[in-house]
Amino acid sequence: MASPQRRIVHVDMDAFYASVEQRDDPELRGRPVVVGGRPDQRGVVAAASYEARAFGVRSAMPMANAVRRCPELVIVRPDFTKYQAVSRQVFALFRAVTPAVEPLSLDEAYLDVTENAWAEPLATTVAKRLKEQIREETGLTASAGVAPNKFLAKIASGWRKPDGLTVVAPERVEAFLQQLPVNALLGVGPVTARKLRAHGIVALVDVRRFDVERLTSIVGSRADWLLRLSHGIDDRPVQSTRRARSSSSERTYAEDLTDLEAIRKEIDGMARRTAAGLERRKMTARTVTIKVRYDDFTTITRSDTRRPPTADADEIARRAVALLERTDAGARPVRLLGAGVHNFTAAADGAPSSEPGAAAESARTPSATARAREPLGNPPGDAGEGGRADSAPDADSDSDSDADSDSGAGAGAGRV
């Protein structure tokens, strides 16, 4: 007997940190609010209310830029203890419906509701009830996407923010895909998107015009994965327990770094701390990545992937420092540095800790939902309140594959 059509719900809280602050302080309601660090200490925006977004303020933006865009901006220091408490409330509601809950962050998760505690055959009804429960329990709103798989559900959840619900019924999948740009694909960031556009692949469905061999020459081993997504195929299960796919450390400096030796020392220390984390978790990693942000806010990532995987601190540090040679660090002032590892393997038996692939694009990069909607003339969806764990099977990826990265309409409401 054929297995039933999966019913996946992706729930994403709306402007989570900022909305919690506005809920708890009536003086903040209706005002442009951001959660983050001070502009005079190179703070960044962790979350922006929708009132702030009307001025072009976005998550991960330097706070000084945000204040220039919106002089009346109200800046609130983050209270992660409070956000975690609210998150626990929300996830308790999720898990009362189904044990198949895959957290992506404090405010976002996938749920497989094909079978659920309410014996509700329609995922759309489950999503509506969950949204109502979240509002009643927390006083906050959430947006939800309903679809036959995770890829489509995640894009759908951002389609009508805030407080939205978008359903991509199985019979409407093709019509939905036809609306999306190529950078809506999981694992396609700015660098890969430029490569694809250079070959005439602008819309998501344009990927279908290329066979695997030709697409591989452009994107490497991700070709088959991208082809499957372009047809709306995503067989990844909802994983109620997720193992980490990457680990990293970064720091923004109060004063720009200009001395190359000092920069090397910083990267060396970050890489060694990351390696210590691998050792504690009894993991190894194939890919070492660094991030450099210059004084003009241009951000680049560089990565090095090798076999066999390693947790050796000396090797990881050496490879991270060597990656600096592929940057302008020292020649250009640096305001932020980061170092990390990904493509994990369990050290004990050599088995991969997850599907081949890397973590999702950095929180500094707009979410797939936001990227999907911007070319269509819709307002961007939430880019998120911090790192997202969602990822795609992907060759040795940093923020955009193993290549270097330099970053400077509703669906049908069928029965799902």
Image (tube, rainbow, N blue to C red):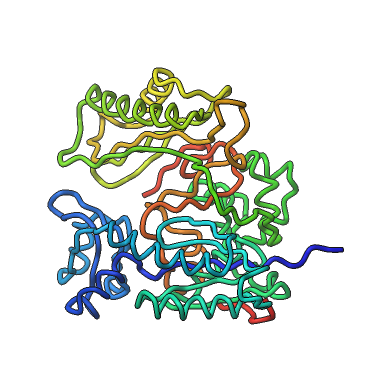
Q: Position of residue 274 (x, y in %)?
A: 38, 31
Q: Position of residue 401 (x, y in %)?
A: 53, 41
Q: Position of residue 39 (x, y in %)?
A: 16, 55
User: For the point 59% across and 80% down, which residue is it?
Assistant: 125
Quadrant containing the C terminus is bottom right
Q: Position of residue 143 (x, y in %)?
A: 47, 73
Quadrant containing the N terminus is bottom right
User: For the point 59% across and 39% down, which residue is it?
Assistant: 395
Relative height, residue 394 to residue 269 (above, below)? below
Determine whether, in the image, residue 253 is placed left or right of residue 214: left
User: For the point 50% across and 50% down, which residue is it?
Assistant: 189
Single out the residue that lies furthest toward the left.
Answer: 40
Residue 356 seen by the camera: yes
Determine whether, in the image, residue 118 is placed left or right of residue 286: right
User: For the point 54% across and 57% down, which residue is it?
Assistant: 102
Single out the residue that lies furthest toward the right.
Answer: 1
Residue 178 seen by the camera: no
Single out the residue that lies furthest toward the top.
Answer: 314
Relative height, residue 11 to residue 319 (above, below)? below
